[in-house]
Amino acid sequence: MTNNTGDQTAPHPFPIPRSCPFSAPDAYADLHAKAPVSRVLLPTGRPAWVVTGYQEVRALLADPRISADIRHPNFPALTEGEQEVGARTRPFIRMDPPEHTRFRRMLLAEMTVRKARRMRRSIQRIVDERIDEMLDGGPPVDLVTQFAHTVSSTVMCELVGIPRSDPWFRRVTGTLGSQVFGGGASTAEVASEGIGALSDVMDKVVSDRETRLGEDLLSRLIVEQLKEGKVTRQELITTIAILIVAGWETTTNQIALSVLALLENPHLIEELRQDHTRLPAAVEELLRVLSVGDSIALRTATEDIEIGGQVIPAGDGIIPLLAAANHDSAVFPDSRQIDFERQGRQHVAFSYGIHQCVGQNIARLELGIAIGTLLDRVPTLRSVAPLQEIRFRHEGIAFGPEQVLVTW
Ligand code: HEM
């Protein structure tokens, strides 16, 4: 066992860009070959620990001695300013129990497999309408902004109870779009500010909804939580904003990157065409291999934690790398290979432990419908530019392509 004072190697700068967009950065395997836990230097100048082993990532994320509280002095923020914005807005993803549990429970009942299945028809309609628009508007069209973003933002709005016909729909989706597509890269700081901007819009949406309650998620939370005094108005607004942002940016990137990965591997598209029942396994494998939310799970040790033969001292920042875990060759042999036969459900693309993604049932459904329907309805779909000319967002909340021009 070693401790940090005995570690003489210079810490690796982090984040580490991917060399192949469809896999974890090569350096993760190099770091992992030396040890499952390594020291890195963040862009803020702070050191932190990254965890690269599958077993170690799961053990750590299930360990009650870690904190997700963004106010912790050594919270491993990935950009300047992110911590200050987070400490102000207090998103529940960056809280610990019992605070975190209160907000998570509020949403969990709305996110069950059964509730997600009830959204099947509306997600199918949303995807079909977006494909109609795409077909009318092109070719070429940008798969990221004109399909992945529009599908995922519309699904998130519909989930909350702001359908396309709602007067607030355009304000909400416009706020989301301008955060990422207006200003270039989506850094964690931009995303945190986005939650602030979205909260301002949601404030007005809540006021409006209070005057015309319906059967939707937002109305239920107003009646069951706000009016019962279980949450404050600001807490409700921030929780809804977090839900929308968390479900939108990840899914946008996962849809766009999945389609691009499939277009680069036409034999996989053929496999899906021949047997539609493989779609859920394909979604699972694409979640694993692409791991778009690699470094979303940011933590701090609240006590000394021994993991992978290393003692992480109390107070140090830790980043369990989800892409590294999903490419740990001891669990996923030949991990870069996209293989729909793989039993990939034990991947950690949705994280693990008490912060594991609450929207995963909806995400799985949405990904399957979006990818499956697009390939079915546009069988000649192909990327205009060669892969090496496509630019990717490496330092965002979620990894994904900036733009993918497609034709058919
Ligand atoms: C491909 C799609 C998605 C991916 C890869 C993804 C990934 C993740 C990850 C890695 C976390 C855990 C962060 C941590 O451990 O600190 C998380 C949390 C969360 N996700 Fe997702 N997510 C996706 C889709 C969604 C959707 C569709 C929704 C909403 C319907 C959603 C809502 C949330 C929320 C609210 C949290 C915070 C949970 C908590 O802190 O308790 N996500 N997601």
Image (tube, rainbow, N blue to C red):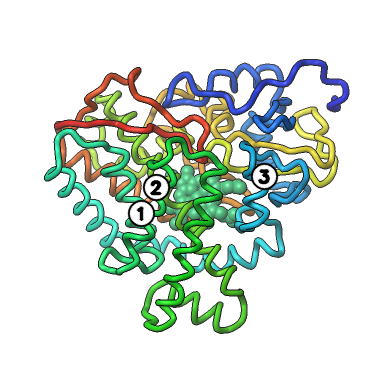
Q: Is residue 264 left or right of residue 238?
A: left
**Marks 2 and 1: in contact by CB < 8 Å?**
yes
Q: Position of residue 14 (x, y in %)?
A: 63, 27
Q: Is mark 3 within 8 Å of ligand 1?
A: yes
Q: Which residue is mark 3?
A: 61
Q: Camera-side residue: 310 or 87? A: 87
Q: Quadrant of the N terminus?
A: top right
Q: Which residue is mark 2?
A: 178
CA gap, disc 3 to disc 2?
Answer: 33 Å
Label 3 sits on what residue type? Leu
At mark 2, the secondary structure is: helix
**On screen, 310 above or below 119?**
above
Q: Which residue is mark 1?
A: 174
In the figure, residue 58 lies in which quadrant? top right
At mark 1, the secondary structure is: helix
Q: Quadrant of the C terminus?
A: top left
Determine crowd level at label 2: few under 14, some 14-19, many 20+ residues with C-alpha closer than 10 A. Answer: few
| Foreground disc of the pair 3, 1 | 1
Q: Position of residue 258 (x, y in %)?
A: 35, 35
Determine crowd level at label 1: few under 14, some 14-19, many 20+ residues with C-alpha closer than 10 A. Answer: some
Q: Residue at x 29, y 31 (%)?
A: 404
Q: Earlier in the sequence, mark 3 or mark 2?
A: 3
Q: Is residue 55 left or right of residue 258?
A: right
Q: Residue 83, can we see it?
A: yes
**On screen, 406 above or below 210?**
above
Q: Is residue 171 left or right of residue 101?
A: left
